[in-house]
Image (cartoon, grey):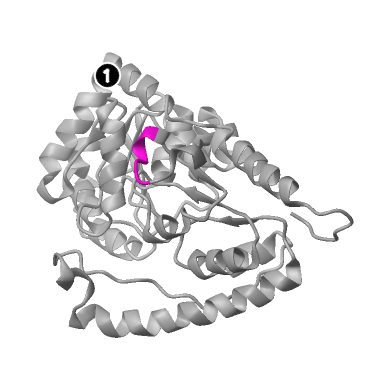
């Protein structure tokens, strides 16, 4: 995916080998790391990471950058190690409230650590290195107008709009409660639902089995809202989704009342993201494992039936929004790069 995106904007893409470190989150202690399910893949991926360090060193020697920027995924580990070995300063960015393993390792060598949440959320990092810039959002998120969104999705501007998303891959847990509460919700609301590409066929099949008297013209399911997410957010009166940084950031910069349903089983960072915001009253949080269609609809009614609650949620989450995050992050990277430039060098930051 990254290769296509990078090539599409005219930049050079240089792939390297990398591997992730798997842990069994259902075990504890020694068994969490060393068990039959993870030992083989971890050994293989350790070798891939070592090979990736060598590949990254060759690329960095050829490109000769003044600064390296690392986003935190496991592919960044060999690049960060290579930059350290070559004496090239690097900046890392941590989107979530709970840092991933790669950023925890690289933080000891990083020149600066840009973070997506207020710095008090990151006790494991050296405070002097932290810079709160927020998380960048796409320009179309910031510029789309509500009436554009209403027209694009062919909605009624007199009926409240709910945007529901489980991320690009979708979330069967969320999709199931949406289907179960559809009759009740569509009596009062319109729904734009990003189901995930892997779920859209099932959703459409389930809809096809519904009796015609229960047709739902106010329900609009999509596999993935690639270029239309800005318009969907602009139209929305309420956003519901997982607690990934994209959902949170988009809602925050726009001040959208938001309900989060974090993935408790597979992504601990989502739980902490939701916790940070809920402590400030910026979101309402639901436990997906205990959620029923009735409870889901009740929660939506509670928010959309109370103007004061909508205003409170909007103001509280907007405090986490950083609409100029991309500019601030770019400025930080350039500052480090300019400080490392050498006279008469042909390197580019």
Which is nearer the eye, 166 or 96? 96
Q: Residue furthest top?
A: 308
Q: Position of residue 104 (x, y in %)?
A: 40, 55
Left or right of 96, for residue 335: right
Overall secondary structure of the magenta stretch?
A: loop
Left or right of 338, for residue 116: left
Q: Position of residue 278 (x, y in %)?
A: 26, 31
Mark 1 closeness class: few <14, some 14–19, many ≥20 residues within 10 Å: some
Q: Is residue 77 above or below residue 317?
A: below
Left or right of 46, for residue 332: right
Q: Is residue 59 above or below residue 210?
A: below
The stretch in magenta equals 120-124
Left or right of 183, for residue 242: right
**Element carrying mark 1:** helix
Point out the image quarter for the C terminus.
bottom right
* Residue 314 is covered by the magenta coloring: no
Point out the image quarter for the N terminus.
bottom right
The residue depicted at 52 percent of the width and 82 percent of the height is 51
Q: Position of residue 215 (x, y in %)?
A: 26, 47
Residue 199 visible: yes
Q: How many marks?
A: 1
Which is nearer the eye, 237 or 64? 64
The residue depicted at 20 percent of the width and 46 percent of the height is 213
| Image quadrant where residue 313 sits | top left
Q: Position of residue 9 (x, y in %)?
A: 70, 59
Residue under numbered circle 1 = 309
Which is nearer the eye, 18 or 216? 18
The residue depicted at 72 percent of the width and 72 percent of the height is 61
């Amino acid at each position: 995916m990254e290769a296509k995106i990078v090539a599409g904007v005219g930049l050079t893409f240089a792939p390297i080998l990398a591997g992730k470190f798997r842990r069994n989150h259902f075990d504890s202690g020694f068994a969490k790391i060393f068990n039959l399910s993870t030992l083989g893949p971890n050994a293989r991926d350790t070798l891939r990471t070592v090979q990736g360090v060598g590949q990254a060193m060759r690329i960095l020697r050829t490109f000769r950058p003044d600064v390296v920027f690392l986003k935190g995924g496991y592919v960044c580990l060999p690049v960060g190690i290579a930059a350290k070995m070559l004496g090239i300063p690097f900046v890392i960015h941590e989107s979530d409230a709970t840092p991933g393993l790669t950023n925890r390792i690289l933080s000891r060598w990083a020149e600066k650590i840009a973070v997506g949440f207020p710095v008090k959320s990151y006790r494991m990092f050296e405070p002097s290195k932290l810079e709160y810039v927020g998380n960048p959002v796409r320009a179309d998120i910031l510029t789309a107008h509500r009436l554009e969104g209403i027209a694009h999705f062919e909605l009624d501007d007199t009926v409240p709009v709910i945007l529901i998303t489980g991320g690009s891959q979708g979330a069967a847990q969320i999709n199931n409660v949406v289907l179960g509460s559809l009759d009740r919700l569509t009596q009062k609301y319109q729904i734009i639902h990003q189901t995930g590409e892997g779920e859209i066929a099932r959703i459409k099949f389930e809809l096809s089995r519904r009796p015609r008297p229960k047709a739902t013209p106010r329900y609009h399911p999509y596999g993935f809202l690639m270029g239309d997410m800005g318009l969907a957010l602009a139209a929305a009166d309420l956003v519901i989704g997982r607690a990934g940084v994209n959902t949170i950031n988009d809602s925050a910069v726009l001040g959208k009342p938001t309900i989060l349903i974090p993935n408790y089983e597979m992504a601990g960072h989502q739980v902490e993201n939701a916790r940070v915001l809920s402590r400030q009253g910026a979101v309402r949080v639901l436990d997906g494992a205990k959620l029923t269609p009735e409870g889901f609809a009740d929660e939506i009614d509670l928010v959309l039936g109370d103007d004061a609650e909508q205003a409170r949620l909007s103001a509280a989450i907007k405090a986490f929004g950083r609409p100029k995050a991309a500019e601030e992050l770019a400025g930080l990277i350039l500052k480090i790069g300019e400080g490392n430039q050498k006279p008469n060098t042909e390197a580019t930051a």
